[in-house]
Image: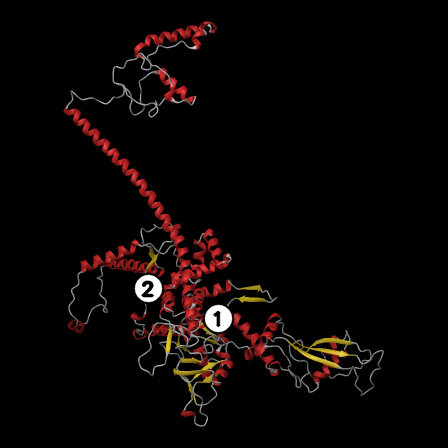
Amino acid sequence: MKGTTDRSTPAHAEAPETTPSSPRLTIRFESSMSRFAEESAAADRAYLSAFESLSAVVLEQVFIGLDFPIPEGSEPFRCETIAGTFERRDKESRHAAAADSQAVGEKSGAEPSESAVDAPSSAEAATDPAVFYDEDFAREQKKAEDAARNLLPEFPELDSGICFSKWVYDNVDSDDLVEISTVLGTNSGRTYRQLSSAMTILYGLPRFTDRVRAGEFTRAHVDVAAQQCQNVAFEFLPRIDAFLATKKADVTCDSLRRALTKMIALLVPPTDATEIATKRRRIDVEGYKDGSACLTVSGPSAEIFSCYNRIQAMALAINGKNKSAFNLPAGVELNDDRSISQLEYDLFVRPVPELSVKVVAVDSVTGIQTAKEAPMLGADGELIPGLDAEDGLADYAKRVAAQSPDADSAIAGDVSGDQSIGSAFAPAPKDGDQADHGPVEYSIKLRMPTSQSWLANQAATVVTVPFLTLTGDSDLPGTFADGSPVPAEAARTIAGRSKSIQRILTDPATGTPIDAKATTYTVPRDLRKTLIEQWTVCTVPGCSRRAEKSEMDHVNPFFHLAPLKGGLTRFGNIHPLCRLHHALKTAGRYRVTMPKSGVIDYEFRHGISTTVSAPEQPINVAQVLDFAALAHLGLERWTLPVSMVPTVPTVLELMPGESTIRERDEKKRLREERDAKQRRLSEAFNDQRAARQRLRLERCLDWENSVFQPCLPAGSDTAAVKQLTGNARYAQVVKWARLAKLDIDDIDFDPNEPDKPSARTNAGSSITGSEGNTQSEDTAMRKDAGTADPWDHRFVSKTVNWDHDLEVDPPPF
């Protein structure tokens, strides 16, 4: 079986036969996990490829909708990336500010001073070779670069204050959404989320996408990054992308989620985060097919964590039978078979503070069973006096069983008082005797206490607050025990009400807590809190149990006889493991080594080896930068080398789809045909004009023998009308033939034939006198016109008439 990559193993024989499938893990050669790793990597590549296709479809339609020019040939769409757009805007703003300051300086008469950093020292001038600087050439190069950059349009509809979720909702057409939903088989809401995730990963985090293509992150990491960043404003995405470009490849997606959550909390202003969390507080419910349902509560993190800690502490106290937490009297034991999860649910859905006793009594005479409840707390919330005695609770239960419906208020009084209660079947007890009310069973029902002392002792919330945030010099967020950020104002409030504060020193370069040690097997409280802050969760890959609830494991076993000889309780040898994984490690199911503090190597039995590192602490690093800014310190030794940070892409290229290419080619073909037709007409027109010019020249050279083109009669307006000469009767015959839909070739007409008398003339006997006079006048006018009428067949034009075809060139009237 082949390995998961094509990398060759070292040549020396001592090297282990392992294959690095990714920067996250290695696989032993011919392991049973090799094929699974290959298929998983192929599935990750296919998932990213689907994201690329989906985002390309969306962005192409946005380009077309915004009338971006469709590129020719095999050229792609080109525009600036989000990072490139913001970089150009930043440069333009800096240049504008510099120009304004220079204008103000020139107006005041002050000469611009040269920075001391830019001025080379004498030693550098002596050692470095001389380089001649051509100012004109540099200026021309700068202009050419700026001109090339300005030719590219910005990322479409880019607004620094919106996120990809809103961008997709505003720019994706409804018909495209329906089509994509048909392909994905999802509803509109899920399709919007899928589109937002694809656009966020491919165009919001391009450097992180390159690492995903290289196999450093999986599909789960992609989903986490998309979920965390699709609601982040565009202006913060380049910095998040730079953070992900240099981040170590995480073993699991949970560590990436915690790191991204902290980084986003640093970028987004705290007031905005608090307002957004407050506005979005809500409760969602979703039913499942098995009859269960899920209730999701969203709101400010401080309130949610406090509520959860209160419920969890109550459930742990009941499950652990910790009766001292509830101030139960002597002789009372907690007996509850529910699990911690079941207890948490019961406490959450019924969070009413109450402490009561339920008594089930059976009358010895009638056999009737009764059940009654009575509170064990008085009006002030304290236990009723006498309940903490040896038999106080049993006596109280009997009194509850024996009480009448009208004696509810008497039970809460003196428990030790004597009351003689009889019945119709049993006499009242004599003096000194105790009434027998039959068998009595009682159980105590606990409800969640809300007193401040109980919450402080049982449901405490641990928050790590940066020192500058605590002093008010910064607004860096704090973190809960699981690594979730808490706004600065809420962190200060929690710290102000806390009874104890522990100092944790961190490494200024990485932000991780620095070394602490102890010589005892038991982990001290301060060291435990420091390790919890360092690791956050159980160090086993895939385990999400919080380090706060985990056990502390010694990588090298603690040597009890001589602690200083090995296995010390210190950084570099201790890490948090939950109870299950601690037991597996002790049983030898996997091997654990710690080459250095904050780094753990795991080797599992199926050949998988991986390295787990302590999560990044960007909040602590930001605090170091704030400290340096307050102290005016230089940060050259803490800056990341430029060579280690991938360059940010500034040009976005997108190949058009097949349908767009076909549509473009069809439009191009039609345009070429139209241009060819126009070109042929233009050439024919130019040829005719040249021929006319040659004809005029020839006539001018031989004027006497020239034969001229037939022209219009003199005095006609050639621009308004074309006056034709011919036979009026023939034109009328042609007109009536066309109205009768007859062929013009079938017309039998002789223009030289004399006019035939019409039916109107033959019917002269029926014409009145006035009509007859009119007819004779018309005939006389035609005879008088004679050869002067151009529409008469006897007309002979003094000029040359046009030879024309009535079919092709009919008269305009």
Instruction: Give the labeled residue for mark 1.
Output: 490
Work out whether mark 1 precedes mark 2 in sequence or the reverse, and give the earlier one.
1
Image coordinates for residue 227, horizontal then vertical, percent: 45, 65
Q: CA distance from mark 1 to mark 2?
A: 36 Å
The answer, for residue 504, to whether it is visible in the render is no
Q: Is residue 583 visible?
A: yes
Quadrant location, the C terminus: top left
Circle 1 residues within 10 Å: few <14, some 14–19, many ≥20: some
- What residue does disc 2 label? 648
Of residue 188 and residue 732, the one placed in the foreground of this image is: 732
Given the image, on which type of amino acid does mark 2 rest? Val
Q: Quadrant of residue 381?
A: bottom right
Mark 1 lies on a secondary structure that is: helix
240 or 271, nearer to the observer: 240
Q: Is residue 18 above or below residue 275?
A: below
Residue 525 to residue 491: above or below = below
Residue 770 x/y as whole percent: 44, 6
